[in-house]
Image (spheres, rainbow, N blue to C red):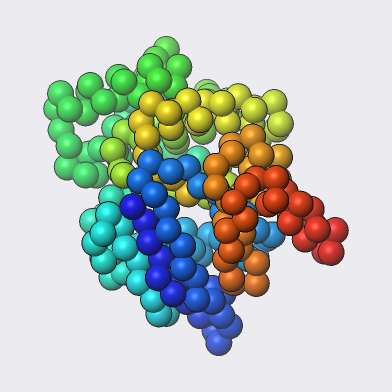
Amino acid sequence: MVELEHVCKRYSGRDVLKDISLTLERGEFALLLGPSGAGKTVLLSILAGLASPTSGRVRIGGADMTRVAPERRPVTLVFQRHALFPHLTVYENIAFSMRARHMRGDTVRGRVGEMLAMTGLEEYAQAKPNVLSGGQCQRVAFARALASEAEVVLFDEPLSSLDNGLKAGLIADLKRLHRVRRFTALYVTHDPGEAAALGGRVFLLENGAATCSGTAGAATRFLKKSFEAD
């Protein structure tokens, strides 16, 4: 579903990403781990179309998306901060991603209703983000991403600002949503515990190079060594 072919990214004469090649299968939930500054967000930005690689190709669903605009890619991104629109209700925040893809009418109403039910937010449909907890806001962000029916969902450390209790609940929610919707996902984190709880195949990113560790356990050992070295 997703292929990066020899992707490099250079900023100000520095190679942030060096010859990255990786593949995600359709419906796979994979993890991208690495210490701060490793280039994880840069890689997501290239997949989403928010940045262009210096060299290499991005393929999604078999199509070359290397120079395709973000709005024309079957990709959505869940940010580190939930990035909800404060002046819109929960309903309208979720609907926004669909309207941006030119969906209208009953399609929007039906899909938003489905996502509200799946995330347990029905009673907050007309609430504004300022009355929601951090965990509820992140559920809205998940619902907004999935409502668009993008085939690929990218997660840029969406739980990093939450405490461990909220994290555990949202990880369970996210795993359940993936079982139901079977979207292809790449989830960025630098938290070994989060990676172990989410499971899935793991790619390690360090000094601009990526390797596949295969398991969250191996990734956890890798990250612990990285943090000890720091």
Residue at (45%, 36%) from the top-left corner? 141
Look at the picture and state if 161 lies above or below 211: above
Above or below, 78 against 14 in this view is: above
Is residue 51 left or right of 192 when viewed as pictured? left
The answer to which quarter of the image holds residue 125 is top left
Q: Position of residue 91 (x, y in %)?
A: 34, 25
Q: Is residue 149 visible?
A: yes
The quadrant of the picture occupied by the C terminus is bottom right
Q: Nearer the viewer, residue 69 or 177?
A: 177
Q: How many marks?
A: 0
Q: Residue at x 70, y 51 (%)?
A: 218
169 vs 91, nearest the viewer:
169
Question: Horizontal and vertical percent for residue 18?
Answer: 54, 76
Position in image of residue 206 (x %, y %) = 65, 67
Q: Is residue 80 visible?
A: no
Q: Residue pushed farthest bottom?
A: 13
Q: Is residue 205 left or right of residue 220?
A: left
Q: Residue at x 36, y 31 (%)?
A: 181
